[in-house]
Amino acid sequence: MKTSKILAAAALSLLAAAGAHAEIYDGVHALTSANNRAEVSAQAAVAARSANPYAEGYASGVTTIASTRDRSSVREEAVAAAHAPNQNVRRESFAGSVIPSQFGGARISTTRQAAL
């Protein structure tokens, strides 16, 4: 009985080996380009310096935003806000989320998220 099982297993393994075929390795494919190295290098330089056609804003170009405020007034406001003593006061920083009175006139800043 052992011999018949061994023979059956050998026969099945021969059938499995005959049925399995591996892929044939053809080696490295031959170069099919008609361009020489200098032409390819020139094409690569042009492609590297051109705009990315797959970028999201490729076709939109440069957008301009019309502002009603003058540059110097915006700068003065930014400098004043940067020098304010309470510029980083947040209600989450204090116990009970209450800003103490010594920070009088502190503007409460809240974190906002853009709506999608």
Image (spheres, helix red, strand yellow):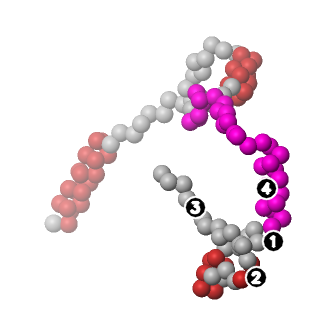
Characterize the local packing of mark 4: few (<14), some (14-19) or many (20 or more) Cα atoms within 10 angstroms: few
Q: Is residue 61 visible?
A: yes
Residue under label 3, please give it.
Answer: 112
Among the two numbered marks 1 and 3 on one chain, the one whose residue lies closer to the N terminus: 1
Residue beneath the point at 78% across and 49% down: 74
Among the two numbered marks 3 and 2 on one chain, the one whose residue lies closer to the N terminus: 2
Residue under label 2, please give it.
Answer: 102
Q: Quadrant of the N terminus?
A: bottom left
Instruction: State if disc 2 and disc 3 touch (CB < 8 Å).
Output: no
Residue under label 4, please give it.
Answer: 78
Among the two numbered marks 2 and 4 on one chain, the one whose residue lies closer to the N terminus: 4
Dot 2: element? helix
Residue beneath the point at 59% across and 34% down: 57
Location of residue 44 (image quadrant): top right
Q: Which residues are magenta?
A: 55-84
Q: Nearer the viewer, mark 2 or mark 4?
A: 2
**Left or right placement of residue 8 versus residue 107 in this view:** left
Residue beneath the point at 82% across and 60% down: 80
Residue 42, percent from left and from top: 73, 19
Amino acid on which the number 4 mark rests in the picture = Ala
Between the C-alphas of marks 1 and 2, the distance is: 11 Å
Return the residue nearer the eye: 89 or 56: 89
Residue under label 1, please give it.
Answer: 85
